[in-house]
Amino acid sequence: MVVIRVDVEIAASPAVVWADVARIDSHVEWMVDAAAITFTSATTEGIGTTFDCATKVGPVRLTDRMEITEWVAEQVIGVRHEGLVRGEGRFTLTPVGADHTLFTWTETLTFPWWMGGRIGAAVSRPILRAVWRRNLRELAARFARR
């Protein structure tokens, strides 16, 4: 199992950041490792929403099956990963002053034996952390450009 946490301060209020990140299919616009999102439920937001995310990190490509398990407007989106890599992820939006948001992304993942299990998780941790830091820089840049 690997736990990864990254965060970024965004120059926008939690309400403005939420309006963007609550559109799950838009995540491919700022997540360099997310190639495509396909909803597998009738809903596209809120608890119970399910989707497949075609994911690529270097030569590794897989479909990450996810279900939204937590949804608190302007505060939290939690997901369960049910694909080959299993675990839980969480986006947390915390107000910073009147018009900034601390966006925190935490993932707890378990890798299958054929991806190296615990060793694969340990090796992937710095790689995934770097990719997700880049993702958050891209997310913050979306608001800086506005």
Image: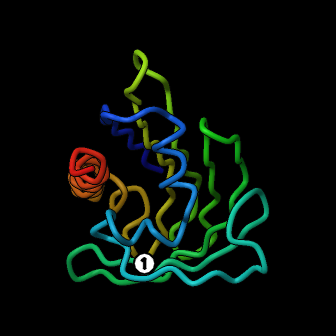
Residue 139 position within the rendered picture, expressed as x and y whole percent measured from the top left:
31, 52
Q: Is residue 80 above or below residue 58?
A: above
The residue lying toward the viewer, choosing from 27 and 90, is 27
Residue 25 position within the rendered picture, expressed as x and y whole percent measured from the top left:
51, 72
Residue 107 position within the rendered picture, expressed as x and y whole percent measured from the top left:
48, 48
Q: Is residue 126 visible?
A: no
Q: Is residue 60 above or below residue 26?
A: below
Q: Is residue 10 visible?
A: yes
Q: How many marks can you see?
A: 1
Outermost front residue: 146
Q: Please name the residue shown 39% across and 25% down the image.
A: 99
Q: Please name the residue shown 43% across and 65% down the image.
A: 27
Q: Please name the residue shown 47% across and 71% down the image.
A: 113
Q: Please name the residue shown 45% across and 32% down the image.
A: 13
**What is the three-letter code of the residue carrying label 1?**
Trp
Residue 130 position within the rendered picture, expressed as x and y whole percent measured from the top left:
21, 52
Q: Is residue 128 above or below residue 98?
A: below
Picture colour scheme: rainbow
Local secondary structure at mark 1: helix
Task: Answer few, some or many: residues within 10 Å of disc 1's Cα (few below 14, many 20 plus, some between 14 and 19).
Answer: few
Residue denoted by label 1 = 114
Outermost top residue: 97
The residue lying toward the viewer, choosing from 43 and 121, is 43
